[in-house]
Image (cartoon, rainbow, N blue to C red):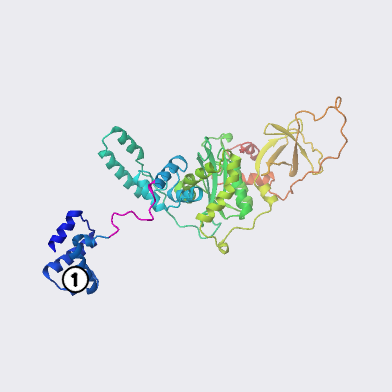
Amino acid sequence: MFEVENEVSLVRKVELNMTEELKYEIIKKLVETNGNKKAAALKLNCTQRHVNRLIKGYLEEGKAFFQHGNKGRKPVNSIDERTVREILTLYDNKYYDANFTHLSELLERHEGITVSKTFLRELFLKNGILSPMATRKVKRRLKEYLENRKKEATSTREKNRIQDLIVSIEDSHPRRPRARYFGELVQMDASVHLWFGDVPVYLHLAIDDCTGRILGAFFARQETLYGYYNVLHQILVSYGIPACFYTDNRTIFEYKRKGTPKLENDTFTQFGYACKQLGIELKTTSVPEAKGRVERMFGTLQSRLPIELRLAGVTTLEQANEFLTTFIEEFNAQFALTTNHSNSVFEAQPSNEQINLILAVITHRVVDKGHSIKFNKKFYFPVKDDGSSVYYRKGTSCLVIQAFDGNLYAVINDSVHALDEIPEHEPTSKNFDLPEPVTEPKKRYIPPMSHPWKAQEFSKHVAAQPHREIPEGVTYEDLWYTIASY
């Protein structure tokens, strides 16, 4: 017996795991001492019949009998080396910055390679590649591993390569409970990033705190009122009126004095005025962690969206905003929590006409000596609904309303007029062109006065804002001059 074991051991070195080693020691002692098979069966939690099989195998093969037969063999379902090299090449050249879950989806969708995210994580960690979505614990472990490899490296080139792989630790946002109802709290913010092309742009985003669903998104060159109006328009058209918006303390949302009596340094919240007409509560915060859902969403989108935009060949803002329509639908289907519409607090969707008039930019102007109004470096005449011009004397104050669709209106003396642009040159010449047939003025659409565009209503909203003291000696009419046009 002993000679058989030695002969087998001479062929190859046998290494056993803890369970296999325990079986070997118990059976070896049983054979050498001619011990109790029943006691051995209890120790091994098996039958005496199986103990007899173990004794027979020990006598025939020795220690090697207790080693699993597949040890050291490559599994039949393992990924071949050629596919592994292809995955690493694709990640470096095409799918860089994708997290492992997203990468597994992209490989299956575009390359026909089906691998699990677990396999990708193990493969990339062996190669010193960290997922953009890695946790602090994983980052810390990888950093320790790379620092040990750096100490063992012999060449300066290898040390520099390892140093480039070391990743710093990032703090995470604290958790808080989600809102109870769909539409109860909508977090809104914008993030500047190199989303596509070679120039960073701003992604304006709104997500529902209850479900994590993206309710609206819009790309723009800057973080402006126009971008947030587009997001709000998407929410109103698709879902209705939410209960509350939670944003940061940007001047778009807050009208604040900058510690100076100069009114030109103040900014009025036009977005807040639109929310007031819709009955939406507007809350702001200067702490990013307070609106951690939208901050965390930007982290996810910065990992996934640039890759999707690049694969779709997006190079312009128009293409990007068009791509967002299908992307958001697919993203919500995959990641958003299920929506129970019986628990929705969204109010009924306003009409398209109401939405167009509420999402307006309001600016104060004065009628000049030519009975016209200057707006955005162009001159306009106020007209009635029958298309005939209306003339007001010089110095008459008015509010210019730029609706969401771009149409211009003017509120003068509690009357609403459309604005017709005055061309820089006459369209025809009386002396050199054939006379055109005389036509009646074109009938124009004039919004009803029921819309709260009255100067008195607008002024009350300015004064009602918290911490909105108006300097002494300044009237509401003076304050209108400080309204920002975005």
Q: Pick whichever, 51 or 216, lies toward us.
A: 51
Q: Pick whichever, 197 or 63, lies toward us.
A: 63
Q: In the image, is 476 to the left or to the right of 422?
A: left
Q: In the image, is 5 to the left or to the right of 75?
A: left
> Quick check: 266 above or below 114?
above
Q: Pick whichever, 87 or 240, lies toward us.
A: 87
At x 65% / y 41%, what residue is drawn? 362
How far across and how far down the image is residue 150, in percent?
Answer: 28, 39
Q: In the image, is 389 to the left or to the right of 167?
A: right
How far across and how far down the image is residue 273, in percent?
Answer: 62, 47
Q: In the orientation shown, which residue stands out farthest toward the left?
A: 33
- Identify the element where label 1 is drawn: helix
State whether residue 271 appears in this view.
no
> Quick check: 313 above or below 377?
below
Q: In the orientation shown, which residue stands out farthest toward the top?
A: 431
At x 71% / y 39%, what residue is drawn? 398
How far across and how far down the image is residue 100, in percent?
Answer: 43, 49
> Quick check: 237 above or below 268?
below
> Which quadrant would residue 68 be assigned to in this image?
bottom left
Q: Is residue 78 magenta?
A: yes
State whether residue 231 appears in this view.
yes
Q: In the image, is 249 to the left or to the right of 51?
A: right
Residue type at numbered disc 1: Ala
Q: Quadrant of the C terminus?
A: top right
Circle 1 residues within 10 Å: few <14, some 14–19, many ≥20:
some
- The magenta segment is 69-81
Task: Label the magenta part by its dominant secondary structure.
Answer: loop
Residue to which mark 1 is pinned: 40
Q: Quadrant of the N terminus?
A: bottom left
> Which quadrant would residue 12 be assigned to in this image?
bottom left
How far across and how far down the image is residue 416, in percent?
Answer: 74, 44
